[in-house]
Amino acid sequence: MSKSVLSSPVSLRFSRWFSVGLLTLGLLGLRVDANPIEVLPTQFNREEQTSIDVYQAASPAVVTIGNGRGTGSGTFIRPEGLILTNEHVVRGSRNGQVQVRTADGSTYTGDVIAVDRLNDLALVRLRDTGGATFPTVPLASESGIRVGQQVYAIGSPFGLSGTLTTGILSRIAPNGDLQTDAAINPGNSGGPLLNSRGELIGVNKAILTSGRGNLGIGFATSATVAQAFIAQNLNNAPLVASQPTGPRLGVAVDPQTLVIQEVQTGSLASRIGLQPGDRLVGLNGRRLANLEQLLDYLDTRPRSARLTIGRGRQLAEIPVQF
């Protein structure tokens, strides 16, 4: 009598699983072969590549500047360590000195050597560099600045150094200021606005705001204005000042007490007899409430003025011919 051979339940389950597994693998194989994974292109489009190229070329020359109250940005324009930034970024710096952090994380002390409050420009020269040279950004000529062109802003908004934003040059104001929709935030001030050739076309300085916040409109001082400022002040000595009053007067003034701290040798202030310890009391017969009044007046490029000076307990009115 022949014996029937029966498969055990385990054998049957294994057989079913094996068959199902083969079928599933086969189906998966067919699916993969029929719909291969799409590989993304290895190259960026033209607009992306331009942004990348501009950033790689210019960002090593962009620095973060601290004045003891906050931070801003700046750009190396000479390899020996000359930086272009905003006047309001260095305003109130102690003894005319600021702290500069470069893109590679190195830190230096910088001397303010020139300010232009009207156009919100300043020059800072690094000290104690040990002979180091720094990457620079070239300034654009007037032909490199056109409404409608793509622009790139690099800076340290809210302390986030090396931040890139993009937009277009929306308008050139009658005074030459550049208007852009590229995002500019606190900390971007003093940083470069660049064209697609990586040239500096402007120094970012302000945003238009309302009660609803940032309206997405930013402003920069044009490179054509900055070029004249640089040429005029390239070789200046440091403005050793808590609050520099600029080359027109040549003194360092404590912004709280209005007491003159230092007088530059050979300056207008030294020629009219101003001394450290003198106190600025009045201007053109009116009492000075704060240093801003004097700075604003000097920005108007007056030909003359009458300064009232306090020396000890005595007051003296000194005529000044600029």
Image (cartoon, rainbow, N blue to C red):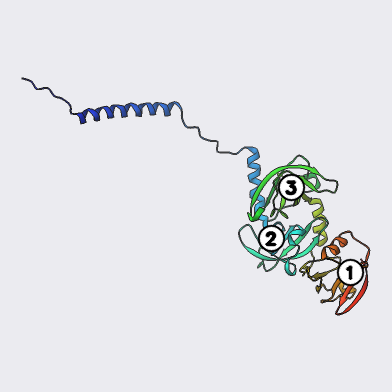
Residue 282's label in the rendered image is 1
Label 1, label 3: how far apart the Cα atoms are: 36 Å
Residue 211's label in the rendered image is 3
Q: Secondary structure at mark 1?
A: strand
* Left or right placement of residue 190 versus residue 18 in this view: right
Residue 7 is situated, as x and y percent measured from the top left of the image, at 17, 26
235 to 221, vertically: above or below: below
Residue 196 is situated, as x and y percent measured from the top left of the image, at 70, 44
Asked if the residue at tag 2 contacts the one at tag 3, i.e. Cβ–Cβ closer than 8 Å, the answer is no
Asked if the residue at tag 2 contacts the one at tag 1, i.e. Cβ–Cβ closer than 8 Å, the answer is no
Of the residues under marks 1 and 3, which one precedes in the sequence? 3
Furthest residue in direction top, as rendered: 1
**Is the residue marked by circle 3 packed among few (<14), some (14-19), or many (20+) residues within 10 Å?**
few
Q: Is residue 266 visible?
A: no
Residue visible at 46% across and 30% down in the picture? 36
Of the residues under marks 1 and 2, which one precedes in the sequence? 2
- Give the mark toward the camera: 3 or 2: 3
